[in-house]
Amino acid sequence: MGSNPVSKVRIIARIRAQSNKDADNVDRISVSKPWILVLRPNPNSHPSRVKISFGSDQISSGKQSCEIDDCYEQDVGNEEIFIKEIKPLISGLFGGQNSTVFAYGPRESGKTYTIQGYEEEMGLAVLAVDAILPLAEEQGKIVTISVFEVYQDRVSDMLDTKRPEIAIFEDGHGKIRLKGLSKVKVNSASEFQRLYLQAANARKELQKTTEPPHRYHIGCIVHVVSPQTEKSCAQLVGKISFVDLASYEDSRRKSIDGFNLTEATRINKSLYTVHNVLYALNAKDARVPYRESKLTRMLQDSLGGTSKILMISCMNPSLCLETVQTISLASRSCMAGFLACLDPGKSSKIVTKTSGMSSPQVMKSASKFNTRSNMVSPKVKKPMSASVLGKKTAGSKLHMSMKKDKDVSFEVKGRKLFDDTIQLKKSKLGNICPESASAMESSSQRETSLSLASVAVSNSSTQQEEQFASSAIDLDSSQLPFEEGKGILIASSDMDSSRLPSEKDALQIVNIAPTTPFTDQTPPTGYFLEDKENKSSLPNDGPSPPLSARIQELRNNLNSLCFSTDANLKMALESLEPETPKYLHRVEADDKHAILEKSEFKTPIADKNAKENYELTTIESPWESFHMRSSRAKDSLVQEYLKFFNTASKEELKGLKGIGEKRATNIIEMREESPEPFKQLDDLKEIGLSKKQIKIMMKDAVGELL
Ligand SMILES: Nc1ncnc2c1ncn2[C@@H]1O[C@H](COP(=O)(O)OP(=O)(O)OP(=O)(O)O)[C@@H](O)[C@H]1O
């Protein structure tokens, strides 16, 4: 696949050819003005990424640019992209390598044209089947296809629309199963094209009748299978999935299509999850947030492991804002691979004790922000050839802009730009279409430390989105370490790496509270979190405040962290200079929960030899001690509760509020496929429960015990 040897995920862009319809576009810009510049590196340079700059004749400054693996311009057809990008994936397919191809971008950017194509122009999926079939025949394999749709986190079978919603679960061998998704054998590319177009077009027709129209992801999975014989069952050799993602729409737009904002936000959230997954995979993160959307969860075994991913970011030159955002997001995932390659030792494994944390991963983000971004600020130094959208010449103006680009050094702050929380930050953004040049300029001046995507995405908030994100955070907060009391480890760039704890003997800070300064020596900076406001809650300063006040404080801490932007978060972390923990408690390094022994007054640094064997714990008040114990109790309650789901009989399950005949049957069936399908509370979503319902059910169960 192309020429990117380092990344698991290859990120390319495609500029859609202009059509007559562009004249009526919403941005009312003249697309004849070139505003997308594609700068190609010297063919011998390595790694050879393409730089895309956005600007126009009218924009003299504030030019923004991004790097991606490659870019196909308007005159390139599907066939050429297929040969360069998809063919290498097909060879892997017969060797057992799964792969996934995504098309992402704003509306009418050519996603469907690229993936599915039209009768007269075969899309990449059709071209792939056309190439796979003869190879399969040669090797005695068969090819089956599935077509699915993901709408509002519901997965439906598009080849048999009467089927119920597809259930996604993991079997006993850790394989993802899509229960209820039909597979149809195909014998020719034209048969496949007919089936695929029929399914997709039926959905499009239906969409025309719905008010407001819906946005959804549509995908197809092409399986190569060893057929069943007398001696063996049919066996999957490999599969390649093609996903035409829902169009990305900046939710600040006055719903041109009448989309309601909640739906738009939800769709964007699932698109961000796809990018977060690609980012995490490329950055070789320890945790990949597959579970955060149905789409990534169902494709998990075609994304993780040895799978290859191709993300095609489609550009619609008439939609400036969304196009810039699309490329910025793509570029970020692309650079994650580059940075991970430069710095393989420092993956986000630094944060080892945040297992209970789900999205938004503020802490993890913080660690990326601090450990990576400061190290590398890649600049394109190599000479480039250039082509300008609309006129492929490298003129003097271009030369000037390249000089400028050098100054505007291309920075990727190693962070999930699209954590849900980021959407909460408001500022004024101008898009970078010619009319909005000044807005962009001022925006870029204000936010130079953030990448364009960050600016753009952070500005897409609206009141409703705030509410949406805020409620999401509310739900997630129960899993964040503050409340779970599992401890937080935050690494900062200032941290002396020699003092970084290894995964094995990780320093754990259980409930961080302000304390007196170190007597001997200042501890390493960066991995403490304290609430300076809370000084009055020191044991020595008087009695602990009432429980409700402490809970409120913790909630505030949590919110302030969640709502921080990169810059704010970094500032917050920097301002949280460590102070001496009052007590040190001996902890067995490999014990999940801190085993507290007799308190000793000792600083960890004073006794360097003992450092390895100690975890820092600050047990400051009876409340904190209570909190730690109660969170352990909460953990074991959750485990007991899940055990019930994994073992109870159907009748017992039906005794639970919210579990009727259908869900109970579903649970039993899931257990037949996998002995222990429920490993964490989130897994209950697989039986159609919302996060809120799970929370309520859990509360009910706990309530009964009291
Ligand atoms: N490379 C191309 N060359 C010629 N025409 C194209 C190209 N890409 C897209 N088009 C045309 O542009 C229009 C929009 O393309 P398409 O439907 O593929 O966009 P989309 O991103 O899937 O849109 P949406 O998400 O709104 O469904 C179609 O009429 C299509 O034929």
Image: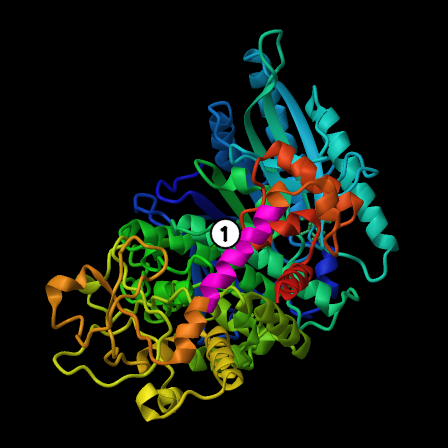
- Measured from the top left, where is residue 702 in percent x and y? 61, 63
| Residue farthest to the right, as pictured | 209
From what the image shows, is residue 530 above or below residue 226? below
Left or right: where does residue 497 sit relative to residue 102? Answer: left
- Measured from the top left, where is residue 163 in percent x and y? 80, 37
* Residue under the point 51% across and 27% down: 93
Judged by its main secondary structure, the magenta piece is: helix
Depth order, front residue of 647/445:
647
* Residue under the point 43% across and 73% down: 626
* Residue under the point 39% across and 40% down: 3
**What amino acid type is highlighted by mark number 1?**
Val
| Residue farthest to the top, as pictured | 230
Asked if residue 114 shows in the view, the reply is: no
Left or right: where does residue 311 sit relative to residue 369? Answer: right
Give the residues in magenta: 630-644
Asked whether mark 1 lies closer than 8 Å to ligand 1, one says no
The residue carrying mark 1 is 277
Quadrant assignment, res 399: bottom left
- Measured from the top left, where is residue 504 in percent x and y? 27, 53
